[in-house]
Amino acid sequence: MILVTGGLGFIGSHVVLSLLAQGQEVVIVDNLANANLQALERLEFITGMYVPFVKIDVRNTPALNKVFEQYPIDAVINAAGFKSIEESRLKPLEYYNDNVSCIMSLLRAMQRTGIRNLIHLSSLAVYGVSSLELNENTPLNYTYPNPYIKSQQMIETIIGDTFRTDNEWRIAILRVSNVVGAFEHGVLGELVPPLPKNIVPLAVQVAAMQRDAIELQNHADTLDQTTERSFVHVLDVCEAIKASLYWLQQQHHCCEVFDIAGEISSIQNLLGIVANVTNANIKTVEAAYPFEELAQTASNSQKAAEILNWHAKRSLKQMIEDEWRFYQNTLNFK
């Protein structure tokens, strides 16, 4: 059985659906800070199965211990935590407390119960370096002044130090780029809050005439002065996790990092694709409060291709089409 922390969030819920489709048994843990029970209802509707769910905060180690005691868990996929680079500047204590405390509590519970198989979902931003050619040998820039990025760097350090204490650990850290998209049939996707933290949900709100415009940073050192990012379909991420689980089963003692990235696009170009897919004008205004951000973040994911036999299959256009289809379904549902 596989424990998915943050399993009712955008990425976590798709991971759960993917695992269930493979015939795996899954138990979900989530505190519903960035999710709601509608995702659980959709999972059970799609699969026609009861999906075990425990509402706890991963930081609550005694409660987490009880989950490990109650279920025959043999692997963990950690998708819990706060993930907004911009929001972390405004709420640094929340990000350090949530993200770092989560991994410490999880590792302690795993250590206590003898479970040594872990996939941790990190971020391509963890490098703290501006480049379109990031790879796993790129040194992390520990001086980059962003709490989210620093929290992910701390998490990877904690995982690495823990790994070295016990020769039974099998760990894969997936440094994932910006995740977009939805399940193909539009029944599961990103449940967009009224005030989204990411660019694509903001853009679809404009397309649906729920928002007038997007604030756009346009002072990056790039061709069109908007940041350049790698985007990956959520289902491609699920396939990377599937490949990682299979690979871990063949290992004895490992802690490996893999970049999981897809198509590269500037934010300006991304908004053009959203406009084309939604047949709407995505109006932008200059950001009122500019802030420093990495101009470029992308990787070719060569190590994942060579070792996991994984590569991103879905285009950015398909990501937007799938996300827009799901968003329209949620509007109609309301």
Image (cartoon, rainbow, N blue to C red):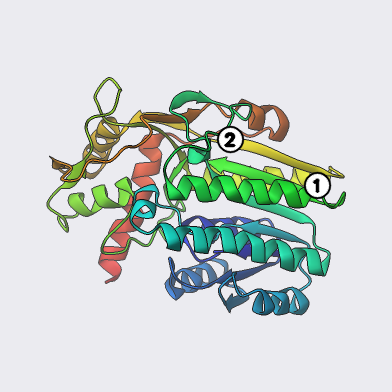
Residue 298 % position (x, y): 47, 30
Residue 18 % position (x, y): 60, 55
* Among numbered discs 2 and 1, the one appearing first in the sequence: 1
Neighbour class for label 1 at 10 Å: few (<14), some, many (≥20)?
few
Neighbour class for label 2 at 10 Å: few (<14), some, many (≥20)?
many
Q: Mark 1: which secondary structure?
A: loop
What amino acid is at disc 2? Asp
What amino acid is at disc 1? Arg
Q: Is residue 107 left or right of residue 299?
A: right
Q: Which mark is residue 164?
A: 1
Residue 17 % position (x, y): 57, 60
Q: Residue at x 65, y 66 (%)?
A: 105
Q: Quadrant of the N terminus?
A: bottom right
Q: Is residue 254 left or right of residue 137?
A: right
Q: Residue at x 39, y 39 (%)?
A: 318
Q: Which mark is residue 259?
A: 2
Q: Residue at x 67, y 51 (%)?
A: 158
Q: Mark 2: which secondary structure?
A: strand
User: Looking at the picture, does residue 286 appear above or below residue 207?
Assistant: above
User: Looking at the picture, does residue 2 appear above or below residue 316?
Assistant: below
Q: Is residue 189 visible?
A: no
Q: Residue at x 75, y 64 (%)?
A: 110
